[in-house]
Image (tube, helix red, strand yellow):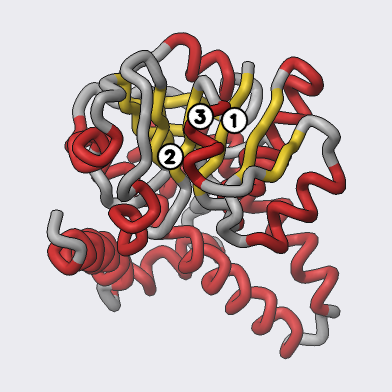
Amino acid sequence: MRLGFIGTGTLAKAVIEGLIAVHGDRLEIVLSKRSESVARLLAERFPAVLRAKSNQQVVDEAEVVFVAVRPQDLSEALSGLLFRPNQTVVSFVAGARSDDVAQLVNPATRVLRVTPLPTVAQRRGPILVFPAAPDIEALFAELGTVIVPESQEQVMALGFAGGLMASFFQMANSGIHWLRDEGVPTEMGRDYLMSMYAALGTEGLNSPVTKLPDMPREFSTDGGINEACLCHLEAVGWFETFTTGLAVMKQHLEDLRTECGR
């Protein structure tokens, strides 16, 4: 299968690395000139990666075209490109609905939304595929946890939740810095907290959804340190404030859509 990428930023690079690690020489990948340094690096590392002279060459040579540009660059990146009716177009563009992209890639009618995280390079993390597409789901199946939403609204909401990544690292860094002030070396604090969060994520992923509401208390011994922290954060409204961050992200993407005329 020959895949094409318009846009070669951090996310596209992670996806390409993951795909090659899983599928190897069963794929050929054609990259656009956007982020030239990244495209050159990938082409030097992987024989299956080819650099195109233009976005049109990417479209001409690929069976599946991945669009991986910023929302505000979407119209410019796709303007004037000639797609084929039988071509599959996969959008990674945050905040852009499939209908938005479909208008720009006509006459191609098979337009999908895939939302991976940069951790896809390590074959971890959620990967949204919408609408259901067995061939694309199979392509990503070994790169993380493939999730197939039932509606565009679910896609958008889950995409907003992806904006929690930076906040997670800031929370972890706060814990690491506190440990450092308590005399724990930074690397040791990193190893402890990140290993703990990874284990907790696995525990939550493997638990029935009906159990999740009980897990905060399950991991809190009466009178223990987890309970003390949880009660304090609840008392100051930390979780309510945390939730408003999702609303802020949603509004931000809506503002971007307005600026881009979509």
Q: Are marks 3 and 2 in contact (CB under 8 Å)?
A: no
| C-alpha span from label 3 to label 1 | 29 Å
Residue 44 in sight from this viewpoint: yes
Q: Quadrant of the C terminus?
A: bottom left
Task: Answer with the quarter of the image where residue 248 lies.
Answer: bottom left
Quarter of the figure with residue 35: bottom right
Rendering coords of residue 49 (x, y %): 74, 37
For mark 2, give the secondary structure: strand
Task: Residue under label 2, please give it.
Answer: 115
Q: Rate crowding at label 2 as few (under 14), some (14 to 19) or many (20 or more) other CA atoms within 10 Å.
A: many
- Label at residue 60: 3
- Image mark count: 3
Q: Residue furthest bottom?
A: 181
- Between disc 3 and disc 1, the foreground one is 3
Residue on which disc 1 sits: 144
Query: Vertical placement of 13 versus 166: above or below?
Result: above
In the visual, does 229 lie left or right of 193? left
| Residue at the image position 45 percent from the left and 9 percent from the top | 134
Q: Nearer the viewer, mark 3 or mark 2?
A: 3
Which amino acid type corresponds to the residue marked 2 in the rendered image? Thr
